[in-house]
Structures are given as structure tokens and as C-alpha cells.
């Protein structure tokens, strides 16, 4: 049964990356706790923060069921109701996706983060969302029926000139109407796609939050008031100036918002989002450079960090007046890539 959610779930959600132990790809759960606590400091909480665990940025496609379950349990324990907590649900079958959602609900999360289905071309690269919207809608309905919790959608589906990366507006609206527990839509799109889908979401008879993803576009969409919050992995390394920038816009302080944007934040965002095939690599590089991870590498077969990316991210983070690792620590990793 759908609920009347209003704007309750409009938040600045961070998509939390997953830390591994030094020299391995075993999850470092102690480091994960520390990263969650970083997001529970007053600056983030007071700004209207929220947390999403097991997102794509958290390598959910490459985690076992037991790892996903433990991450959720740790997050529920650490967050303890301080901010809204959503958890990703992802598997190769609808049954497995629902199991993830039910497990997360039993652990005590506030909502579910809908991850695109993975598997055959029929439901991935060859899928026509406008002709066969039921592929995603059926999954969302199955989740909704099993848990009856708020849902935020991660709508990455194909690439098109009009939308960039993301579900077309027609399918988006059908999905939101079919599953009224959808409370937020992650805007994975290019400028045109964000504008088209954002206007579509505003036309619904119930509120669905427009949640910014590619932060290189935030300055513009904050100005256009087509921005209700975020779902973003860049907060793992750039939380402080990002929060300051959003809050300046929210209090209509254009001069301060412009100053922050032009003082390094724009250049950082432009680099991270310049190549979507390197997006999650750069999230992890940034989080590692900030000292939150033992190393910047993702589980294979995901791509490895490159030396030029590490050097550029280090320069750009320092340009935002953010403290990063000592030069010696950076050089030790550079010697391995």
C-alpha cells in the first residue's frame, strides 16, 4: 500500500563507497564504520544529509549476499536513526533482489535503493524501456509488495543524445505512477535529460524528489530550482565544499554559491564526470586521497586507478582546500599503478 510521503525523503544522500583492507579486496568493516561516522558529523546531518549503502558506487554488483547483509547491519547500527538510511537491492533474479530488500527491511533501514537489473541483453543493453517498461516496473512492484518502504530509483539505462545516461521520461512517469512508494529519482542524466525528466516529475500528482547525481550540473539546477537533494558518490571526498555550496543556494546567497563553485569545486566536478567509464574509479581515488580507504582500487574486473587520475584528483582536492594524504603515501600507490 502506497504512503503519502510528501517531501520527507528530500535529502542530500551520499552513495557510500566500500573500503577494502590494505593489499586485498576483503571488506574492511572497521573502516566502513569510520566512513559512516564521517557522514554523521553535524555538518552533514544538519544540512539534511542521508545515507545510501550498497549503491553502485559501493560496488554492489560485486558483493556477495553475506557482504551486503553485513554492510546493512553495520549501517543500521551506526546511523541509529540520525539520518535517513536507504540500502541497495541487486541480484541476477527478481527473487534475489526482493531477498536483498527484505533483508534490509528486517535490519531496520528506512527505504530501498532500486538498482537496475543485471543480466542478459534482453533486460540491459538491448532493452527498449519505452516499449517494454514492465521489465523495471515488475521488479519495483515486487520490491514494493514485499517491503512497503520508500524507494529511490537509480535509473541508469542505456545512453542517448537526448538523455545522456538514464530512463526516458515516459517510462519514468509510468514507473512512478505504478509504484507510488517511489519517493526519489536519481538524476543520472545530461542537462537536457535532467530538464525533461525533472519537468515530468513535477507534473505528477504526488511528489517525487529530483535528486541530483552528476555534480558538474548542480550549480545550474540549483538555480533552476529543479533540485530537491542528491544521490552522489562525490560526497565521499568532497562533502565539505559541496554542502557549503548547496546551503549557499538554499539561502539565496548567490555570491557565496558562485565563489565556492569558482574556487575549485567546478573543476573537481568537471574532471570526475568527464568520463563515465571512470566515474566510480575516481570516487574511490578521492575517498582514498582523503584518508578514508586503505587503497583506491575496486574489485576486478572493474577498472584500476591510473597514475594520471590520482595526480589530477590530488591537485583538484587541494585546490578545494581539502586535506589529503601525505605525499609519501600517494607515491607508494603511484609506484604500483
Image (tube, grey):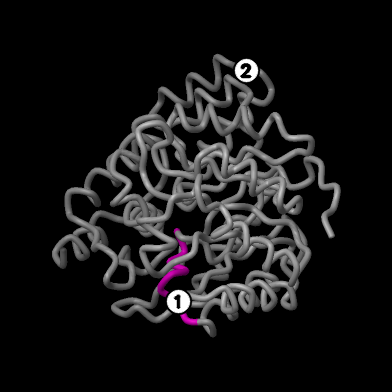
Q: According to the image, label 1 marks what residue?
A: 63
Nearer the camera: disc 2 or disc 1: 1
Query: In this orientation, which residue lies closer to the viewer: 322 or 224?
Result: 224
Main structural element of the magenta stretch: helix, strand or loop?
Answer: helix
Query: In this orientation, which residue lies closer to the viewer: 141 or 303?
Result: 141
Residue at the far top in the pictured view: 255
The residue depicted at 64 percent of the width and 49 percent of the height is 175
Considering only vertical position in the picture, is 270 above or below 70?
Answer: above
Residue at the far bottom in the pictured view: 66
The image shows residue 269 at horizontal and vertical percentages of 39, 37
The residue depicted at 48 percent of the width and 26 percent of the height is 260
Quarter the C terminus occupies = bottom left
Q: Identify the image quadrant of residue 313.
A: top left
The image shows residue 291 at horizontal and vertical percentages of 41, 59
Please give the range of residues in magenta.
57-64
Query: In this orientation, which residue lies closer to the viewer: 14 or 287?
Result: 14
The image shows residue 201 at horizontal and vertical percentages of 65, 35
Q: Is residue 62 magenta?
A: yes
Q: Identify the image quadrant of residue 69.
A: bottom right
Q: Secondary structure at mark 1?
A: loop
Q: Which disc is residue 287 wearing?
A: none
Using a 10 Å C-alpha cutoff, classify the residue at mark 1 as few (fewer than 14 neighbours), some (14 to 19) or many (20 or more).
some
Considering only vertical position in the picture, is 73 above or below 221?
Answer: below
The residue depicted at 24 percent of the width and 63 percent of the height is 304
Q: Secondary structure at mark 2?
A: loop
Of the residues under marks 2 and 1, which one precedes in the sequence?
Answer: 1
Q: Which disc is residue 253 wearing?
A: 2
Amino acid at each position: 500500500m502506497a504512503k503519502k510521503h510528501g517531501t520527507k525523503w528530500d535529502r542530500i544522500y551520499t552513495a557510500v563507497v566500500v573500503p577494502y583492507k590494505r593489499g586485498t579486496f576483503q571488506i574492511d568493516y572497521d573502516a566502513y564504520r569510520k566512513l559512516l561516522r564521517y557522514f554523521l558529523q553535524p555538518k552533514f546531518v544538519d544540512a539534511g544529509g542521508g545515507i545510501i549503502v550498497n549503491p553502485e558506487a559501493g560496488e554492489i554488483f560485486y558483493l556477495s549476499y553475506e557482504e551486503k547483509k553485513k554492510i546493512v547491519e553495520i549501517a543500521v547500527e551506526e546511523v541509529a536513526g540520525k539520518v535517513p538510511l536507504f540500502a541497495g537491492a541487486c541480484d541476477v533474479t527478481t527473487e534475489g533482489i526482493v531477498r536483498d530488500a527484505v533483508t534490509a527491511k528486517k535490519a531496520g533501514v528506512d527505504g530501498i535503493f532500486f538498482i537496475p537489473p543485471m543480466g542478459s541483453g534482453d533486460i540491459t543493453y538491448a532493452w527498449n524501456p519505452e516499449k517494454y517498461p514492465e521489465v523495471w516496473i515488475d521488479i519495483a512492484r515486487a520490491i514494493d509488495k514485499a517491503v512497503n518502504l520508500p524507494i529511490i530509483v537509480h535509473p541508469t539505462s542505456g545512453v542517448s543524445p537526448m538523455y545522456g545516461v538514464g530512463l526516458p521520461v515516459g517510462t519514468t512517469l509510468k514507473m512512478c505512477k505504478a509504484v507510488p512508494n517511489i519517493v526519489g529519482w536519481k538524476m543520472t542524466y545530461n542537462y537536457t535529460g535532467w530538464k525533461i525528466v525533472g519537468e515530468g516529475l513535477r507534473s505528477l500528482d504526488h511528489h517525487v524528489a529530483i535528486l541530483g547525481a552528476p555534480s558538474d550540473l548542480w550549480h545550474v539546477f540549483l538555480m533552476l530550482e529543479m533540485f530537491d537533494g542528491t544521490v552522489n558518490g562525490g560526497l565521499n571526498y568532497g562533502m565539505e565544499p559541496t554542502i557549503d555550496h548547496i546551503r549557499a543556494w538554499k539561502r539565496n546567497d548567490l555570491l557565496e554559491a558562485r565563489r565556492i563553485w569558482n574556487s575549485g569545486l567546478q573543476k573537481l566536478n568537471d574532471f570526475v564526470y568527464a568520463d563515465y567509464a571512470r566515474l566510480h574509479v575516481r570516487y574511490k581515488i578521492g575517498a582514498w586521497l582523503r584518508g578514508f580507504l586503505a587503497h583506491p582500487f575496486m574489485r576486478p574486473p572493474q577498472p584500476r586507478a591510473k597514475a594520471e587520475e590520482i595526480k589530477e584528483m590530488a591537485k583538484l582536492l587541494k585546490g578545494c582546500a581539502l586535506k589529503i594524504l601525505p605525499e609519501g603515501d600517494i607515491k607508494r600507490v603511484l609506484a604500483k599503478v
